[in-house]
Image (cartoon, grey):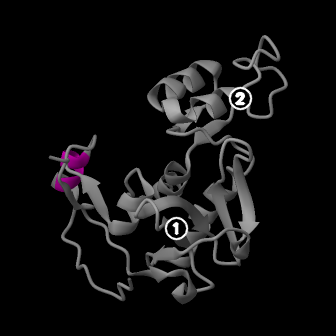
Amino acid sequence: MGVKKIPIPGFCWDQKGTIDAMPPDKLCCVYRFSKDKGNMTHTGVYTGDGYVIHAHGHAKGVVRQKLAAYPWTHFAYRKMAAEQAAKAVAWANGKIGNPYIMGAYKRKCTPAFRKNRAAAYPKSAANIIKYCPVLNKKQATCSGCKYNGKLAFDCAQLTRYAYDSVSLYLPSGATNQYEERIPENAPGVQDLLSKAKPTLRTGSRGK
């Protein structure tokens, strides 16, 4: 039996649905739904100006692209003050050029951390190692590596921490984020439940 998921304490999207209904001038999370897998497989931060910042994979890292450059299928929007949205966008902009590592969660990119993530995500291990000049034995130290000293993210952790920069909680995992659900045994969830104010779960829900 799988782990029970509960609503995110104190949070809900005000609007979500297919990408064609997304407000073009608002900060949103965007998602890609995979029909084969039956869930959301990728996410990014839509910055309200036709562009998305997302952790695009091991080869590209965190990039800024036009919305149409990637096959996004869904969006989720949370109302916030203009200055709050601007702060989240500024945070995301500051991470352009940072590394993508599967399972990375705002930790410095080091050979040791990559080895840790490779062990945790064996299906991605080859790519995690490939883009580290120390682990792929091209050089002895991190000196000169474009990711040296930078924080690493996977796609959902990038969106998670963009919203965290304005004190809004999102869980790990693109599907959990879009569905506003979190595993009841997730780290810190009981603390969130104790602090959360009742949230009126209304708005244009979409599909």
Q: Residue at x 70, y 43 (%)?
A: 98
Label 2 vs label 1: CA separation?
Answer: 27 Å
Q: Where 103 falls versus 54 (above or below)?
A: above
Q: Check contact, mark 2 vs mark 1: CB within 8 A.
A: no
Three-letter residue code for mark 1: Tyr
Residue 120, x across and y down, in percent: 45, 28
Within the magenta stretch, is there residue 134?
Answer: no
- The residue carrying pointer 2 sits among few (fewer than 14), some (14 to 19) or many (20 or more) residues within 10 Å by Cα, namely some
Instruction: Choose mark 2 or mark 1, whichever is in front.
Output: 2
Residue 2, x across and y down, in percent: 19, 48
Q: Quadrant of the C terminus?
A: bottom left
* Front-lying residue, 52 or 42: 42
Residue 21, x across and y down, in percent: 52, 88
Residue extending farthest front = 36
Please tell me whether mark 1 sits on a helix, a strand or a loop. Answer: strand
Q: Residue at x 35, y 84 (%)?
A: 205
Task: Name the image quarter holding residue 137.
Answer: top right
Q: Which residue is mark 1?
A: 31
Three-letter residue code for mark 2: Lys
Q: Where 189 falls versus 152 (above or below)?
A: below
Q: Residue at x 62, y 84 (%)?
A: 25
Q: Earlier in the sequence, mark 2 or mark 1?
A: 1
Q: Give the magenta-colored segment's residue range.
A: 189-193
Q: Which residue is mark 2?
A: 130
* Front-lying residue, 94 or 171: 171
